[in-house]
Image: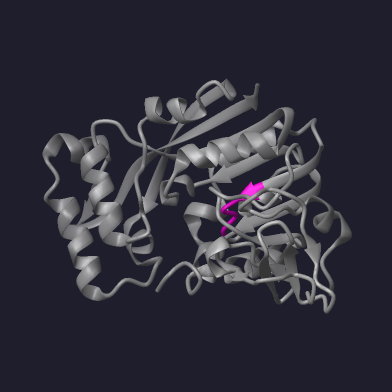
Amino acid sequence: MALKPELIEVLACPKCKTGVRVSKNGKSIVCDTCRLVYEIKDDIPVMLIDEAKQVENTEEY
Amino acid sequence: MGFSEAAFNYYISSDHIKGDDLDLIRKNFKNNEFECLLDVATGAGHCAAAVPAKRRCTLDPSIPMLKTAKEKFTLNTPVCAVAEAMPFADNTFDIVTCRIAMHHFKSPDLFFREAKRVLRPLGWMILIDNIVDVEDSYLNVIEYIRDSTHVRSYRLDEILDFAGNDFRLIDYTCLFKKHDFPEWASRLGGEAETLERIENAFKDLPDDIQKELEVEKTYGRISAYTDKKGFFVFRSV
């Protein structure tokens, strides 16, 4: 089961509070501003800054 | 055993499954139906399930807790996050709830600022948490022995300071909650040595503090105690 559209609409990066998007493969949540990638585990977005992956560039996500 | 391992214990816990605080929520909001609820540190979901709302979002740093809430109360919009860094856009919710959890937060002040940010103008916040008074230092030490994630139970004036100018206090009720000691002490699966330390700490309390906490003994063993829960209804300014 994918994340609900109404949840994606209101989700924001816990660090910068700007909007986020679902990654191309649907397995993570991406903040293009902070270049942080948040994992989705068992259909639950893990929006913990300490557990997010810091990437150089978010284009591939 | 930490919170994640104790998710089912929290679901069946007599301290969480029922209570005057849940009755107060139902009574206060029986004629309201909120559009969008956020339950912060939802645990097993008892509070989120008690509030009438069209959409309910649950937030907790523990995935097993969120899964338990989803399974037991059909709370289908879980988000793994902490109260001090909420992953939501501004002005999203019309009610934020938080029940028996703030004493675990590293920064309650930040939690209040985040609640204000994600609430719509004039949004509601229901906060239920331990309240301490003369027993402050004693009970906080015992709570920490039982659970090292316990940060601090606050005094009434401290909680009102956290709310600051961002919230208006609409209603406050002090509730007295009796705890079955063996169940309460072992909920997090502490080892025998820890359980003994907790019991001895209760036995060593000065008489006036034992009286304040209504400590009950059966055949020399601690069988129950009563603490205070503050039930706050705030509205964002």
**Is residue B100 on the magenta stretch?**
no
Please state the total of marks drawn on the protein image: 0
Q: Residue at x 63, y 56 (%)?
A: B59
Going by the picture, which residue comes out furthest to the bottom? A25
Q: Residue B186 versus residue A30: which sits nearer the camera?
A: A30
Q: Nearer the viewer, residue B199 or B42?
A: B42
Q: Residue at x 65, y 72 (%)?
A: A55
On the rendered structure, is B78 left or right of B102? right
Q: As rendered, which of B61 and B69 lies closer to the eye?
A: B61
Position of residue B150 in the picture relative to residue B175 (left or right) = left
Residue B140 in the figure: left or right of residue A53: left
User: Residue A37 appears in which quarter of the rendering?
Assistant: bottom right
Seen from this angle, which residue lies furthest right? A5
- Residue B55 rendering spot, x and y as whole percentages: 81, 49
In magenta, the rendered stretch is B39-43
Quadrant occupied by the C terminus of chain A: bottom right
Q: Quadrant of residue A49?
A: bottom right
Q: At 64% across and 67% down in the image, what residue appears?
A: A46
Residue B186 position within the rendered picture, expressed as x and y whole percent measured from the top left: 35, 67
Q: Residue furthest front?
A: A56
- For residue B219, say whether it is visible: no
Main secondary structure along the magenta-highlighted residues: loop
